[in-house]
Image (cartoon, rainbow, N blue to C red):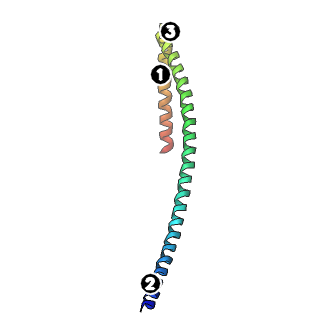
């Protein structure tokens, strides 16, 4: 009876070993997929960081350009009466051009 008990136990052990091997292979494939996902995420993150760094420098240059324009505009407004009249004409022209563009875009959409 002990011989037969060992045979049954050996069969169960072999079955468990086979099941463990299969589970190990499945786990190994899942781990390799997760690793590839992590590497892709890392690559995408690096690309996005480079893109954001480039945009940061572009925004800084635009900010410098706009601040210079605002300084020139405010110095023009603060100077004499003729410049104020010119400023009013400039603002009126900008508002009218904005309204014309808005009307044209509205007409194109409808």
* In this view, the mark in front (3 or 2): 2
Label 3 secondary element: helix
Q: Residue 105, image x and y in percent? A: 50, 39
**Which residue is disc 1 drawn over?**
92
Who is closer to the viewer here, 63 or 31?
31
Picture residue at 55% right of the left edge, 61% below the top: 32
Q: Residue 34, image x and y in percent? A: 52, 59
On residue 9, which mark appears?
2
Q: Residue 73, image x and y in percent? A: 50, 17
Picture residue at 57% right of the left edge, 49% below the top: 43
On residue 47, which mark appears?
none
Label 3 neighbour load within 10 Å: few <14, some 14-19, many 20+: few
Who is closer to the viewer here, 70 or 27?
27
Give the distance between the C-alpha atoms of the residues marked 1 and 3, in whole angstroms.
15 Å
Picture residue at 48% right of the left edge, 21% below the top: 91
Label 1 secondary element: helix
Q: Are marks 2 and 1 in contact (CB under 8 Å)?
A: no
Label 2 secondary element: helix
Comes first in the chain, label 2 or label 1: 2
Q: Are marks 3 and 2 in contact (CB under 8 Å)?
A: no
In the depicted structure, whether residue 5 falls above or below residue 98: below
Q: Residue 14, image x and y in percent? A: 49, 81
**Which residue is disc 3 drawn over?**
82
Who is closer to the viewer here, 17 or 63?
17
Comes first in the chain, label 1 or label 3: 3
């Amino acid at each position: 009876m002990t011989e037969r008990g060992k045979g049954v136990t050996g069969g169960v052990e072999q079955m468990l070993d086979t099941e463990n091997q299969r589970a190990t292979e499945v786990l190994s494939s899942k781990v390799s997929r997760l690793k590839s996902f992590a590497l892709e995420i890392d690559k995408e993150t690096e690309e996005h960081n480079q893109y954001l760094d480039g945009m940061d420098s572009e925004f800084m240059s635009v900010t410098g350009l706009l601040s210079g324009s605002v300084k020139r505009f405010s110095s023009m407004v603060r100077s004499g009466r003729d410049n104020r009249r010119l400023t009013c004409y400039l603002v009126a022209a900008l508002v009218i051009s904005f309204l014309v563009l808005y009307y044209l875009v509205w007409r194109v959409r409808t």
